[in-house]
Amino acid sequence: MSRCLISHLEVQGFIERCMTAVGTKPHHARSLAEVLVEGDHRGHYSHGLNRMDMYVKDIQTGICAKDGEPVVEKESVATALVDGKNLLGPVVGNFCMNLAMKKAKEVGIGWVVAHGSNHYGIAGYYAMQALKENMIGMSFTNTSPLVVPTRGKECTLGTNPISVAAPSKDGDSFVLDMATSAVALGKVELHERRGDTIPEGWGCDAQGTLTTDPKRVLNGGGLVPIGGSEATGGYKGYGLGMMVEMFCGILAGAKYSKNIRTWKVTDRVADLGQCFVAINPDNFAAGFNDRMSELLTIQRGLEPADAEKPVLAAGDPERMNIKKCEELGGIPYHINVVNYMNECGKRVGVSPLLPCDKLLPDQ
Amino acid sequence: MSRCLISHLEVQGFIERCMTAVGTKPHHARSLAEVLVEGDHRGHYSHGLNRMDMYVKDIQTGICAKDGEPVVEKESVATALVDGKNLLGPVVGNFCMNLAMKKAKEVGIGWVVAHGSNHYGIAGYYAMQALKENMIGMSFTNTSPLVVPTRGKECTLGTNPISVAAPSKDGDSFVLDMATSAVALGKVELHERRGDTIPEGWGCDAQGTLTTDPKRVLNGGGLVPIGGSEATGGYKGYGLGMMVEMFCGILAGAKYSKNIRTWKVTDRVADLGQCFVAINPDNFAAGFNDRMSELLTIQRGLEPADAEKPVLAAGDPERMNIKKCEELGGIPYHINVVNYMNECGKRVGVSPLLPCDKLLPDQ
């Protein structure tokens, strides 16, 4: 009985209470709570409630601004440069994505970049906003250095995610939301805690050599770009990570590459760069949704190599996780995470705390 | 003495003569010749002179149109949908990229997609056009199915390349030009011819299992997406391949996925979908080129894991190849390729043929 079930609304309310208790504006707290719950709902627990204490601390210490709104600094009918004013990442993200969608409705595309931003949760959240308007959405962010470029041995790039969402038919969609590293740091940490080795192609040691020992990756080594070694195309993942940095830190005039503060060290403002794009299929060939649906159907209908593992499309694993939550009637959380966050809630004096009465049998 | 040196202009003139001999309009022939020579110049021999006979045949058989110009079907200040009218890929590509750049100069971004196109050579050629105007360029194309989606065993996606070019200072730049498969088919073919095995993570057999035997990849198997197996993140490469298809076949209303004709089988028009983007850094934070230069300097200045292998940025291997050609005073070609193309030239009655008097010592 290590897991308990908590409803979407209970988690969201709790995060909002914790954030407003330390002085966050209510609608900023709501923006953050929505992104974090959506992360958990989609099964990306590393980007959900699990990180709430970081955001609470950012507001408490004043390293992140609690007041103000993002400002448009430069604008055309199709583009904008936004100053995020050091506000919470989701506040900046929602502002920029809404602006991009407004422009895309008018001229077919909106390309908006922001400097002065902070961690914004799952990149897919912003890309998916465009689906509500039957548009294509994209979102990119730079992050603290955790990835070693091909041939190097020092971390100079973040996991710099790429997210792209495209609408199909009947609410179906394609949602790619991926780090440009082979895996997230959390996966390596998980293997280390369990005492397991990691597959070759996830990370390297301090000498830049690929290793299957998670300890070596975490102590002076780093994640490697998608593709793994140079022989298997790791330089492509490295190039994609650089592309994301170019769209974010470089285009927006934010911090970039190894000039971004170290992961988990909040000694100075993050000044992250982020990029948000909306594209209106109506400006291109008619019948987008039908073709998108057929494209997804072709892949999902393929005979799998292993009968137990159906061929999926990007976004399907998350869709399956959401369905599981709906069947259970809530989001399953590990008791330790709930207790930890309730301690955090007590410290800032909120009530009620997260309920942990609906225990789930162990998996 | 298996290689000979031919000047850039000699190769270009020869390709133009061969193409016009079969009825291609002179400026269309020039567009094609320029892209192919640039492919060789950058060291991507698989996308250069080596493919000329395919284009000659496409015009001879009439499977590709020799007359007409691309047409804008739908347009906003920032977007356009183009009918490539089944013209040569480079004719469509240049038309679309020029249009994207014109829009980017006016409103900061131009996003142009084309249906009814054909093979357009290296994707990087079009992205790099934007560098001349100090803009960011992107180019994507779908291609004949050669890649097996993660968990599948049938080829339903092309090698669907992503190219992104961004200007730095003093003529320097970042130029990513990558297939979304782990490697190009040509690399597997080369290993098969040599009798070598391939690294795990390049391709799979007809059962969808990763294999190190190039024969199995070429006979009923297929290339796998960047990232290789599911455990090492192959689903990310698969997602990127789908993203490119979404920007190309789906957005443009061209053929897509397994509906694209089989590679090397030109029994029907290709109707490829392609996407061209230009972004003007002037619309975003001032100082783009300086930051881009610093980003490249950080990576190139890293201490390499292996002292013999410096850390590079995307575009550097091609820059080194161009420098080598300049030092040699021409592009080195294998005699067999020159002879083969001269036979092709003779058949269509052109003269002069490619010179092969400047022999190079074996490597």
Image (cartoon, coloured by chain):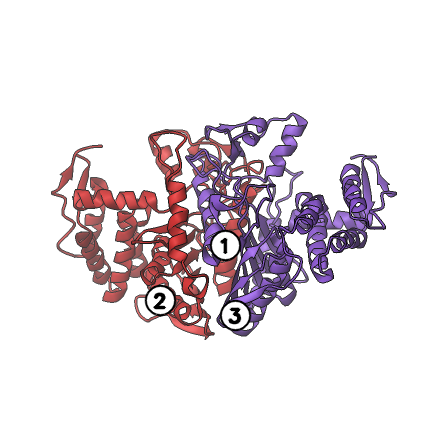
Chain colours: A red, B purple
Q: Which residue is mark 1?
A: B254
Disc 1 residue type? Ala
Q: Secondary structure at mark 2?
A: helix
**Dot label at residue A333:** none
Q: Classify mark 3: residues with Cα within 10 Å, few (<14), some (14-19) or many (20+).
A: many
Residue B182 spot, x, y in % from top left: 54, 39
- B66 relative position to B329: left or right: left
Q: Nearer the viewer, mark 1 or mark 3?
A: 1
**Dot label at residue B108:** 3
Residue A61 spot, x, y in % from top left: 31, 60
Q: Chain of mark 3?
A: B
User: Which residue extends farthest front?
Assistant: B61
User: Which residue extends farthest right?
Assistant: B357
Instruction: Using the image, determine if residue B124 lies above or below residue A336.
Output: below
Residue A14 spot, x, y in % from top left: 19, 55
- A312 relative position to A206: left or right: left
> Total number of numbered labels?
3
Q: Decide: marks 1, 3 in contact (CB < 8 A)?
A: no
Q: Nearer the viewer, residue B40 or B173?
A: B40
Callouts 1 and 3 on one subunit: yes
Which one is earlier in the sequence, the residue at label 1 or at label 3? 3
Residue A268: in sight, yes or no? no
Q: Residue at x 56, y 43 (%)?
A: A235
Callouts 2 and 1 on one subunit: no
Disc 2 residue type? Asn
Q: Nearer the viewer, residue B251 or A343?
A: B251
